[in-house]
Amino acid sequence: MFRMDVSTAVCLYVMSSLLAIFVGWILFEKKVIFPKFIREKADVWECSICAYIYVDSTHHEISQCPQCKSYNKKSPEERLLES
C-alpha cells in the first residue's frame, strides 16, 4: 500500500466527484444516454361488447378488442373527429 496525505485524498475525492458530475451533465445534454422518446399518434377504442377501453396504434377502421377478441368499427362521429 502507498502512503497518502489526508488533504491529497480529499482533493482526489472532490476532483473525481466533480469530473463524474461534469461527464454526466455533458452526456445528458447531448442526449447520448437517454434519447428522446417519440410517441406516435394512437387511437383510443372502446369495445362495443365488453366496454373495455384500449389503445390501438394501427390506424385502421376496424380494431380487435384484446380482452374479448371482438371486432370494433369506428363510428361516423369518430371518423369526423379525425379529419
Image (cartoon, grey):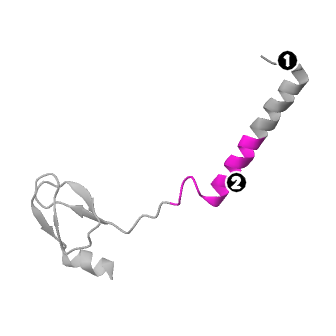
Tell me if residue 40 comes above or below residue 19 in the rendering.
Answer: below
Q: Which residue is mark 2?
A: 26
Residue at image position (32%, 78%) is 82
User: Which tag is nearer the camera, tag 2 or tag 1?
Assistant: 1
Tell me if residue 80 comes above or below residue 8 in the rendering.
Answer: below
Between discs 2 and 1, the one toward the N terminus = 1
Residue at image position (25%, 57%) is 54
Residue at the far front in the pictured view: 1
| x then y, percent, for residue 48 | 13, 61
Query: Is 30 left or right of 4, judged from the image as shown?
Result: left
| x then y, percent, for residue 34 | 54, 54
| x then y, percent, for residue 77 | 24, 77
Q: Nearer the viewer, residue 40 or 65?
A: 40
Q: Nearer the viewer, residue 37 or 46?
A: 37
Q: Residues within 10 Å of mark 2 (few under 14, many from 20)?
A: few
Quadrant of the image containing the C terminus: bottom left
Tag 2, which secondary structure? helix
Q: Nearer the viewer, residue 37 or 1?
A: 1
Amino acid type, residue under disc 2 in the picture: Ile
- What kind of secondary structure does the magenta stretch mostly adopt? helix
Q: Which residue is mark 1?
A: 3
Q: Nearer the viewer, residue 15 or 70?
A: 15
Query: Is 43 left or right of 3, judged from the image as shown?
Result: left
Residue at image position (79%, 30%) is 13
Rendered image quadrant of residue 1:
top right
Which stretch is magenta? Answer: 19-36
Tag 1, which secondary structure? loop
Residue at image position (9%, 60%) is 70
